[in-house]
Image: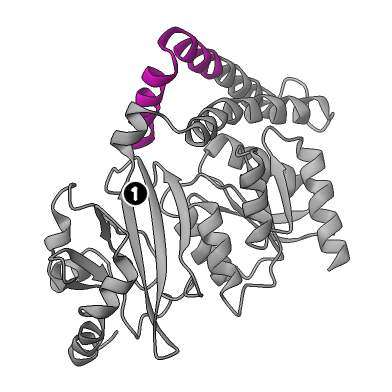
Amino acid sequence: MGGKIVVAEDNPQIARLVTFKLEREGFEPVWARDGEEALALIREHRPDLVVMDVMMPMMDGFEVLQALKMDECCRSIPVIMLTARAQEQDVLQGFGLGAEDYMVKPFRPAELVARIQKILNRG
Amino acid sequence: MPSDKEMDDFASLLMPEVLDTMFHHVEDYVVWLDSTCRIRGVSRSLAGLVGITREEALGRNCQAVMRCRNSRGEDICVGPLGCERVMYDARPGPVVSTTVGMLDSGLPLVSSITYPLIVEGRVLGAVRFFRKEIDSMSATPDRHAVITQLSHELRTPLTSIQGYIDLLLSGDIERGSDLEREFLLTVSRSIVHLNEIIGEFLTKGVEDWWKGSETRSQE
């Protein structure tokens, strides 16, 4: 198992947490610090999967997701939303825009990896 | 990059009937979209940037922005035909979203509505309006917005605490290592931060806390 994963997360501590765990599990994480950078890095790297925060500067995670799903080159890349936004309408919005999975913070790193592996194994 | 003629042609399509149809129910904003959908919107009430010229806009890294005025005399900016990425949300119906602390203009809370510009069945561009929500939200905080912001502020340090402790308990981190110390320090700082947020919320009440959260969003 492995693969390139873009981690879109504006909080450096959480980004460090996610990327550390992913590296330990054999993935190749690429950190994007805001929504704009995420969109650019996803288009550049064409990762196997994206882990996406919602509340980020420049573009929020929903906007990035929406942009990806309108992009021929990127629409098939699975996206896991990883966010503090836990209200039902947020979750529904995420899935409605095409997210593959939706995880609410705080989360367990091992569970995140399990969800990633499940998606990648299926694909 | 569209030529000047293409920009002019596009402008002629926009005025005035199309704009009135599209924007009749929108009040008090601002529009600014660039070719990569980067958010460049600024309200009329902020910084006066709506009056920018095309050259100024280009100088601000907006690759395809033009200035228009609708029949109500309102200035708007629009991404025209030829924008490389302007149509990501150019689909039937407006796309509505609320954003906290996102604009590099320093605007802490806006909602945006993006409309596809479709003329004779062809998608010619997209227009995004930003509505300033600061004043109304400060006076009477919207329940969803408050919960969203509070959830974000509380869950962020909680995420660090739980996540790093999980890593430390996993047995993957060597005891006494620099990594262990780094992770423990992160947990410690997150607990302090979380305590500050809870203290502020409990002592100030919802409305004062909300105003404070707006300020933090701009930092």
Q: Does residue A66 appear in the picture of this structure? A: yes
Residue A40 left/right relative to B166 = left
Residue B66 image point, x, y percent? 21, 74
Q: Main secondary structure of the magenta part?
A: helix
Residue B64 shows in this picture: no
Q: Position of residue B14 (x, y in %)?
A: 25, 80
Q: Name the colour scheme.
A: one colour
Identify the residue at image location x=40%, y=91%: B120
Q: Say what secondary structure mark 1 lies in.
A: loop
Q: Chain of mark 1?
A: B
Q: Residue drawn 47% across and 57% down?
A: B96
The part of the image, by quadrant, that contains residue A87 is top right
Q: Residue B77: which quarter of the image?
A: bottom left
Q: In the displayed orientation, state which residue is furthest to the top.
A: B203
Kind of residue indicated by mark 1? Leu
Question: Badge 1: few (under 14), some or many (20 or more) residues near its Cα, within 10 Å?
Answer: many
B172 or A48, nearer to the observer: A48
Measured from the top left, where is residue B27 in percent x and y? 27, 54
Answer with left or right where residue B5 lies relative to residue A123.
left
Q: Which residues are magenta?
A: B192-219
**Disc 1 marks which residue?**
B103
Q: Position of residue A51 (x, y in %)?
A: 66, 52
Let me know if residue B214 is in the magenta part. yes
